[in-house]
Image: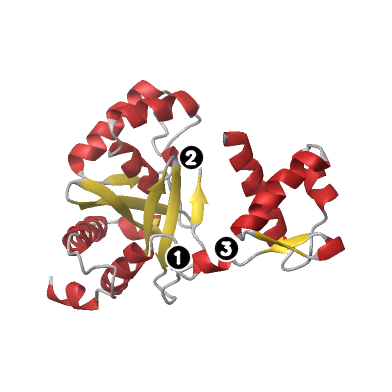
C-alpha cells in the first residue's frame, strides 16, 4: 500500500511539472521502473479520482482534483492568517527578519517570512528535512513527545546541530531539555560581520506546540542589550499569538483585531 502511495505521488509530481503537457504512459512506467500494465492500473485509479485526465493518444495530464484541493487554501491557512499580523507587528518593532514555521511529521515547514526591508511573503511552503540544524527545528524537537523523539533519533543520524560542541544524541537531547525549560532556542554559530544569528520560541495552543516563531539578525547587532530586547519581544509575540490561536474564530478571518487588542 505504501509503495502504491509513493508511486501515486511520483506520478502526480511528474505530471504537474509538465504544466499541462501530456505525459505518455510508457514514460511514467519508465519513471517508476515498473511495467506499462502495472503503471496503467495506477494511472486508471488516478483518472477515476480526478487527479489525472486522459489526453487521448498523447497520454495524461493533471485532472481537476489538485486544483479543487488548492481552492480550500494553502497549507495550514488558518495558522498563516492568524500569525500574519503578529509577525508584521514584531518586525516593525525589532526591525529584523522573522518567520513562522510548523512541523509536518519530521519536516520543518516555513509558512510565513517577513524580512525587515520587504513586505510579508506567503510563499509555497519551504520544507527542511533536518530539524537539528535550525533554532526553529530544535524547538520542534524539544516539544516532541518522548516516543516521537525516540523514533526520530532512530531514523535521523546525528550529523551536527546548532550546538557546535555537541557530538551525539545523548548530549543533544540534554540541550533539548534545556530549550524546553527555557522556552527559547538560540543559534549562536554566526561569527564575523557578515554572519547571522537566530532565535526561536514556541507558540502553544492549549499546551500543544502549534508553530514556532523565529527571528534572525546580523551578528554585529547582538552587542549590548539588543539581543535581549529582540528575545523579549519574540517571547511576548509568541505568547499573544498562542492566546489568539485558542480563539475559535482565529483562522476563519484575519486576526488583526486580536493582534491589536491583546
Q: Residue at x 32, y 53 (%)?
A: 212
Q: CA distance from mark 1 to mark 2?
A: 23 Å
Instruction: Judge the density around disc 1: few (<14), some (14-19), many (≥20) Cα neighbours within 10 Å.
Output: some
Q: Is residue 174 above or below residue 19?
A: above
Whole-percent x, y for residue 169 in the image: 39, 24
- The secondary element bearing badge 1 is classed as loop
| Residue that badge 2 annotates | 130
Q: Residue at x 36, y 48 (%)?
A: 136
| Residue that badge 3 annotates | 66
Going by the picture, which residue comes out furthest to the front? 48
Quarter holding the N terminus is: top right
Camera sees residue 56: yes
Q: Residue at x 24, y 77 (%)?
A: 256
- Asked whether 1 or 226 is in front, the reply is 1
The quarter of the picture where residue 72 lies is bottom left
Q: Is residue 173 above or below residue 13?
A: above
- Asked whether 91 or 250 is in front, the reply is 250
Whole-percent x, y for residue 97 in the image: 38, 65
Q: Are marks 2 and 3 in contact (CB under 8 Å)?
A: no
Q: Earlier in the sequence, mark 1 or mark 2?
A: 1
- The secondary element bearing badge 2 is classed as loop
- The secondary element bearing badge 3 is classed as helix
Whole-percent x, y for residue 149 in the image: 35, 30
Left or right of 44? Residue 128 is left
| Residue that badge 1 annotates | 74
Q: Earlier in the sequence, mark 2 or mark 3?
A: 3
Q: CA distance from mark 2 to mark 3?
A: 28 Å
- Asked whether 21 or 254 is in front, the reply is 21
Amino acid at each position: 500500500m505504501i509503495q502504491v502511495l509513493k508511486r501515486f505521488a511520483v506520478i502526480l509530481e511528474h505530471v504537474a511539472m509538465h504544466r499541462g503537457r501530456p505525459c505518455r504512459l510508457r514514460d511514467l512506467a519508465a519513471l517508476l521502473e515498473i511495467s506499462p500494465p502495472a503503471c496503467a492500473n495506477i494511472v486508471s485509479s488516478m483518472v477515476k479520482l480526478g487527479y489525472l485526465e486522459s489526453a487521448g493518444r498523447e497520454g495524461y495530464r493533471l485532472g481537476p482534483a489538485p486544483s479543487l484541493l488548492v481552492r480550500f487554501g494553502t497549507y495550514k491557512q488558518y495558522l498563516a492568517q492568524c500569525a500574519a499580523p503578529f509577525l508584521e507587528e514584531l518586525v516593525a518593532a525589532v526591525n529584523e527578519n522573522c518567520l513562522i514555521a510548523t512541523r509536518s511529521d519530521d519536516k520543518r515547514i516555513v509558512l510565513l517570512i517577513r524580512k525587515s526591508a520587504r513586505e510579508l511573503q506567503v510563499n509555497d511552503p519551504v520544507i527542511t528535512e533536518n530539524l537539528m540544524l535550525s533554532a526553529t527545528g530544535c524547538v520542534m524537537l524539544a516539544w516532541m513527545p518522548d516516543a516521537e523523539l525516540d523514533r526520530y533519533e532512530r531514523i535521523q543520524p546525528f550529523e551536527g546541530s546548532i550546538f557546535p560542541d555537541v557530538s551525539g544524541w545523548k548530549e543533544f537531547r540534554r540541550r533539548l531539555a534545556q530549550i524546553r525549560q527555557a522556552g527559547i532556542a538560540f543559534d549562536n554559530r554566526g561569527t564575523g560581520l557578515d554572519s547571522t544569528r537566530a532565535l526561536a520560541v514556541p507558540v502553544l495552543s492549549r499546551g500543544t506546540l502549534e508553530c514556532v516563531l523565529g527571528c534572525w539578525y546580523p551578528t554585529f547587532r547582538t552587542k549590548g542589550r539588543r539581543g535581549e530586547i529582540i528575545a523579549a519581544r519574540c517571547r511576548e509575540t509568541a505568547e499573544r499569538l498562542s492566546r489568539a490561536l485558542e480563539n475559535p474564530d482565529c483562522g476563519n478571518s484575519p486576526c488583526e483585531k486580536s493582534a491589536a487588542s491583546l
